[in-house]
Amino acid sequence: MGVRVHAHWVFVADGDGGLFDYRDKVMRALLHQERCLDGFVDSAASADAARAVMGIEADISGDDLSRAIAEGHAAVRAALHSAGIGTPDWPAHGEALFMVSKDLRTE
């Protein structure tokens, strides 16, 4: 029996304009990740120009919580890189697990 996690990432934009273009590139890259990875589904990317943030959501299934978080984290990071967005301050796996709400239900 595995777990299914719904994750939501929020990123602060640190460039001049182009937020919606980047959102579109990230969304295409997320859809590519969905085609390539079992268990990475229902992804979405949003942008809020007034707040200068981009949001990403996805559902990720895995054998356990740690594996699901690792796979989701890797898929989102790969999508960002594919869109030309660097991730120099990306949190380590242990930090990501610490940020996760533990109110999860098994499938």
Image (spheres, rainbow, N blue to C red):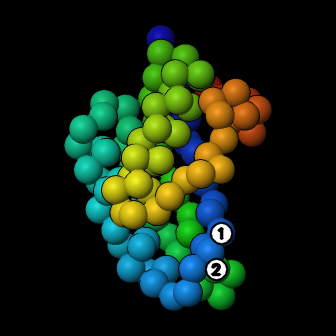
Kindly indicate whether the residue at mark 1 contacts the one at mark 2 (C-beta within 8 angstroms): yes
Q: Which secondary structure lies at badge 2?
A: loop
> In the displayed structure, would residue 14 be above or below residue 60?
below
Above-or-below relation of 86 to 58: below
Please state which amino acid type lies under the numbered disc 2. Answer: Ala
Which label is found at residue 12?
Answer: 1
> Label 2 belongs to which residue?
52
Residue 20 locus on image (x, y percent)? 44, 81
Residue 97, position as x, y percentages in the image: 69, 30
Residue in view at x 55 percent, y 87 percent: 16
Q: Residue furthest top?
A: 1
Compared to residue 99, the image places residue 49 above or below, namely below
Is 7 situated left or right of 60 in this image? right
Q: Is residue 33 left or right of residue 93?
A: left
* Viewer-side residue, 58 vs 53: 53
Q: CA distance from mark 2 to mark 1?
A: 6 Å
Total labels drawn: 2
Disc number for residue 32:
none
For residue 95, say whether it is visible.
yes
Picture coordinates of residue 77, whole percent (x, y): 47, 47
Determine the image quadrant of residue 14. bottom right
- Which residue shows up at 68% across the image and 81% down it? 51
Check disc 2: other Cα within 10 Å, few if <14, some if 14-19, many if 20+: some
- Whether residue 106 can be seen here: no
- Of all residues, the one furthest to the front in this rendering is 88
Residue at 24% in and 38% down: 36
Identify the amino acid type marked 1.
Answer: Val
Q: Secondary structure at mark 1?
A: strand
Residue 8 % position (x, y): 60, 52
